[in-house]
Image (spheres, rainbow, N blue to C red):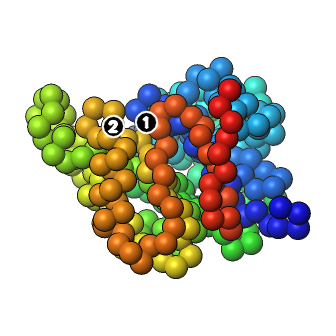
Amino acid sequence: MAGYIMGLGITHLGSGSRGNATLISTENSNVLVDCGFSLKQTESRLAIADVDPDSIDAVVVTHHHKDHSGSALRASKKWGASLHCNMGTAIRMGWRPIEECTTFGNLERLDFPDGMSMLTIPVPHDDSDNVGIIASDGRGSRAGIVTDLGEATRDLVKQLSGCNHISIESNYDHLRLVRGPYPDSLKRRISGRGGHLSNFQTGQILQEVSNENLQSVVLCHLSERNNAPHIAESEVLLAMGDEFGGSVSISKQKGPEFTHWTGIEEPSKLATV
Ligand SMILES: [Zn+2]
Ligand SMILES: [Zn+2]
């Protein structure tokens, strides 16, 4: 890889209702989007990705739900990383702005070392102030990271349209949810405007934002009960059609399994310990 500019690295340490954390890297910076595993788990998953926790510059928390926020404050203190979230999340978490976290507004650009930045896009989700993230390496590569939303907004579709990589939730298969064991009220909440995206919805969004620069898609936050990787993958590939020449992978609860680098076609496999 000598002389090759790697762009942005995207490594899911794991994804699902029991925890989420996604490492976004450039050659000289590391930012963790969400920190929903225990501190010990997060550190052992970072070790698999060969990343020293002390090299994490910042932790960005998308919303207060435990599977995204869990050990964020403890981790940021231990690693000497700055902690970022919006005011709604800070209030729900009881984190003190300035002292413990830096708050951001909607559609605000957060600047990190090495020219990396992230744009925060508000998305509708269950009694929370959730945001999607568009990361940029400052040299033309962009990656979207978006989970936990009932539907896409105009701003989100616009921002995803220019991305080289998209990690997006594909939470449930509609039929499995409807026929499954959940009580009706919970089914309504999951499938409602403030819930999660179905495979079908995710396919529609990806079809709309797909462009010639889009290299890779990672489907995340799959429900273990109401979805299956092969169903999500085939529904999304079908919706995206033949024009999409990139790769589609799944991030599972247990990880990390691979890193996607914008500018490089194939994801690099990580050795599991
Ligand atoms: Zn979640
Ligand atoms: Zn959530």
Tag 2 and tag 1, C-beta contact below 8 Å: yes
Q: Is residue 137 left or right of residue 210?
A: right
Judge: label 1 CB < 8 Å from ligand 1: yes
* Residue 134 seen by the camera: yes
**Earlier residue among tags 2 and 1:** 1
Q: Is residue 254 above or below residue 137?
A: above
Residue highlighted by disc 2: 223
Q: Which structural element holds mark 1?
A: loop
* Residue 80 seen by the camera: no
Quarter holding the N terminus?
Answer: bottom right
Residue highlighted by disc 1: 16
Residue 97 image offset from top left, x and y in percent: 63, 38
10 Å crowding of disc 2: few (<14), some (14-19), many (20+): many
Q: Amino acid at mark 2?
A: Ser
Residue 9 falls in which quadrant of the image?
bottom right
Taking the spot 43% from the left edge, 65% from the top edge, the residue there is 156
10 Å crowding of disc 1: few (<14), some (14-19), many (20+): many
For the residues labelled 2 and 1, the Cα–Cα distance comes to: 7 Å
Residue 271 image offset from top left, x and y in percent: 68, 36
Q: Amino acid at mark 1?
A: Gly
Residue 23 image offset from top left, x and y in percent: 65, 45
Q: Which structural element holds mark 2?
A: loop
Taking the spot 76% from the left edge, 38% from the top edge, the residue there is 51
Taking the spot 34% from the left edge, 47% from the top edge, the residue there is 230
Residue 162 image offset from top left, x and y in percent: 53, 74
The image quadrant where one finds ligand 2 is top left
- From the viewer's side, name the closer residue of 224 and 242: 242
Q: Is residue 154 left or right of residue 226?
A: right
Taking the spot 36% from the left edge, 63% from the top edge, the residue there is 237
Q: Is residue 71 above or below residue 123?
A: above
